[in-house]
Amino acid sequence: MTFYIYSNRIEIISPGRSLVPLEDLGKISPIHRNETLCNIFRYTKFMEHVGTGILRMKRAMDEEGLRQPEFYNFTNSFRVTFWGRNGTEELPKELTDNDDFLDLKKIGLKNRQIKALELILNQSQRLNAKSYSNMFNVSQPTASRDLNDLVKRNLITKEKEGKTTYFIKIS
């Protein structure tokens, strides 16, 4: 597989045509050309649910207000293109010009992260990966990545209670 990252899009090219017709992508069970690669992705949790990837990609692009991914079959390869906003936006490193507000969208937070942050900060809720996963219909590894990203940005903190890690407001 080859990844090309441009200022306005990301293209992923896989050798070999899609075994599923383009019009059926996301509608029927996938046909895997390389079971070994699929098993590695499944084991590392990069591939979370067999047969749901295309629909999740489309939903994620929708949630971010971006164009739907475009799929292409060529003689010897398959390509997916993910379009960005416009290729010229730069993410701010600090607060916006008005130092009273932090524009959460502009620093790259997903809509679901913003909603979770609102619950944690405004309603003093504490979330764990399982509750986040259920609330936003994402896998638990995705939920953990999202919540840990908020911790890394110093927007929330972690609290351990037994085996469960909760994500809470910074006191």
Image: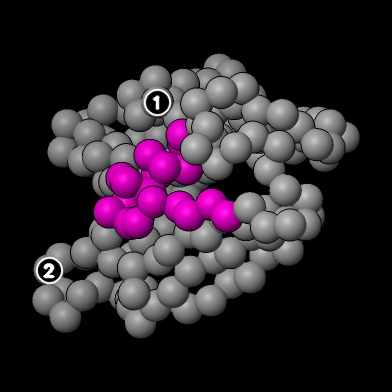
Q: Position of residue 14 (x, y in %)?
A: 73, 54
Residue 10 colored in magenta in the image: no
Q: Which residue is mark 2?
A: 100
114 lies left or right of 162: left
Q: Amino acid at mark 2?
A: Asp
Is any atom of residue 65 visible in this view?
A: yes
Q: In this rendering, is residue 165 above or below 142?
A: above
The quadrant in which the C terminus is found is top left
Mark in front: 2 vs 1? 1
Total marks drawn? 2
In this orientation, which residue lies closer to the viewer: 106 or 120? 106
Q: Amino acid at mark 1?
A: Asn
Q: Which residue is mark 1?
A: 137
Q: Mark 1 falls on what kind of element?
A: loop
Q: Residue at x 26, y 28 (%)?
A: 125
Residue 38, image quadrant: top right
- The 10 Å Cα crowd at callout 1, few under 14, some 14 to 19, many 20 or more, is few
Seen from this angle, which residue lies furthest top? 162
Residue 67 colored in magenta in the image: yes
167 lies left or right of 162: left
In this orientation, which residue lies closer to the viewer: 89 or 92? 89
Q: Position of residue 135 (x, y in %)?
A: 33, 24
Q: Position of residue 66 (x, y in %)?
A: 33, 57
Q: Residue at x 21, y 64 (%)?
A: 103
Residue segment shown in magenta: 54-72
Q: Residue at x 76, y 32 (%)?
A: 32
Q: Residue at x 58, y 64 (%)?
A: 11
